[in-house]
């Protein structure tokens, strides 16, 4: 019985870890003003997703906030 419970917990932890990695890609894309869905698809096909995180971090600048707290492209 212990083996079944331990296997289930390991599987659950692995799924949670994968979900967190892809959520981080989506959050990074949103912080830079890009489509979450587009970068999610890119990270699904371009393995590992850490490469996509590196590309976002290196080549896509963060949006600057205005004085009123809105992003630079929010008024468009």
Image (cartoon, grey):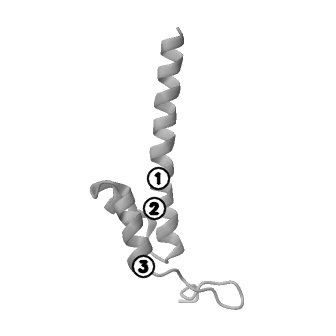
Q: Secondary structure at mark 3?
A: loop
**Residue, disc 2:** 25
Residue 38, by quadrant, is bottom left
The mark nearer the N terminus, 1 or 3, is 1
- Is there CB contact under 8 Å for labels 1 and 2? yes
Residue at 51 percent of width and 35 percent of height: 13
Residue 60 is tagged as 3
Q: How many marks?
A: 3
Counting from the top left corner in percent of width and height, residue 30 is at 51, 70
Residue 21 is tagged as 1
Local packing at callout 1 (Cα closer than 10 Å; few below 14, some 14-19, many 20+) is some
Against 71, residue 44 (above or below) is above
**View extreme (right): residue:** 68
* Marks 1/3: CA–CA distance: 18 Å
Residue at 32 percent of width and 62 percent of height: 42
Residue at 54 percent of width and 11 percent of height: 2
């Amino acid at each position: 019985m212990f083996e079944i419970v331990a296997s289930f917990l390991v599987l659950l932890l692995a799924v949670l870890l994968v979900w967190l990695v892809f959520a981080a890609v989506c959050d990074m894309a949103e912080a830079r003003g890009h489509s979450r869905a587009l970068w999610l698809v890119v990270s699904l096909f371009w393995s590992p997703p850490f490469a996509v995180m590196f590309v976002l971090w290196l080549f896509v600048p963060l949006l600057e906030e205005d004085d009123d707290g809105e992003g630079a492209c929010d008024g468009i």
